Image (cartoon, grey):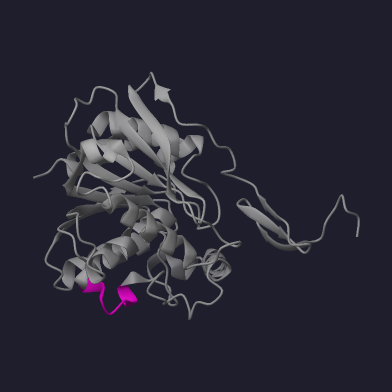
Amino acid sequence: MDSQNPEVALDLSPFLVVYKDGRIERLIGTEIIPPSQDTNTNVQSKDASYSQEANLSCRLYLPNNTNPGQKLPLLVYFHGGDFCVETAFSPTYHNYLNNLVKEANIIVVSVDYRRAPEHHIPIPYEDSWTALKWVVSHANGDGPEEWLNRHANFGKVFFAGDSAGANITHQMAMRYGLDKLHGIVLAGIVLIHPYFWGEEPIGNEVNEPEDSAIMHAFWHFASPATSSCDDPLINPVADPNFRSLRCKRVLVFVAGEDFLRDRGWYYYENLRMNGWGGTIEIVEAEGEEHVFHLKNPTCKNAVAMLKDIVSFLHQD
């Protein structure tokens, strides 16, 4: 085989290609940028290690005009990318979170986690949980990161993410309740175009067998040891503990032209109707595609989404 044209083992374009020699070529989400003093938003950022053992870091964001000792709502953000592409340090997420911090006046911890196929599920969840425990280590004001010690309001914490990151957000909220993560109060979660799935098609999935097959393939690629697409990690409604979600409020965003749209509605309807007891809202952007707000952050629907998130974070 010509070394200039290695044989493809699995083509998951436009995300990545796996070659038979073991090499993995990520086609998107490979660019990274350093933390900054962003003059456009007046937001500062820096990176901090949350696991020296696994060499994992997160990116923190803080408004420049924060007063000494001022406490701000804390948002822990999990990036998307089908569990296999993108990072917390990409321009896409760096710019998005700069704008969110500016508009919401909050402090953010953006979590970077290891990705498939080098690190199959459940590693992304375990890394995210490790990051949360690192965040909580600051709750008494004596953690390793001064921004969190000085400025994080641990009585008003939110988890959020898009796509696979929204999936992680839900799972971290479930684990927060089941494993009794003491030291913080989880006020709510924000799920943007959540990457959920299931064995049996629902809604418009019936009419799109090829897209459904791709969704199945991606999940089994990221989680080869999974039982099926009714694994509670990808189908939270199948989780017997689903109604035990331990937060008061949930905000779900879906996009009208997103193949995952019906899964977002399915999550909303089942959580709302199963005796959970909290408040859940859902917002649909008609005519928009998956994670459109990251691709076109200045469009009308993206601006409206940002305002909805800001309002959610500041509700009493």
Answer left or right for 313 relative to 101: left
Q: How many marks?
A: 0
**13 inside magenta stretch:** no
What is the quadrant of the N terminus in the image? bottom right
- Residue 60 is drawn in which quadrant? top left
Q: Could you say where residue 197 lies in the image, as x and y percent from the top left?
A: 42, 68
Residue 54 percent across, percent down from the top left: 51, 56
Question: What residue occupies the far left of the structure in this picture?
Answer: 316
Furthest-front residue in this view: 142
- Which of the image's four quarters has the C terminus? top left
Residue 223 versus residue 89 in the image, above or below: below
* Residue depicted at 73% across the width and 57% down the height: 23
Q: Position of residue 276 (x, y in %)?
A: 15, 69
- Is 239 one of the magenta-colored residues? yes
Q: Specify the farthest residue to the right.
A: 2
Furthest-top residue in this view: 39
Closer to the camera in the image, 210 or 5:
5
Q: Quadrant of residue 285?
A: top left
Residue 298, position as x, y percentages in the image: 38, 29
Write the start and end of the magenta stretch as one range. 237-243
| In this view, 283 is above or below 246 | above
Towards the viewer: 205 or 279: 279
Q: Is residue 136 left or right of residue 292?
A: left
Residues 118 and 208: in front is 118
Q: Is residue 135 visible?
A: yes
Q: Residue at x 25, y 54 (%)?
A: 189
Side of 102 where 45 appears, left or right: right
Left or right? Give the position of 114 relative to 172.
right
| Residue beneath the point at 38% across and 31% down | 45
Res. 305 visible in picture: no
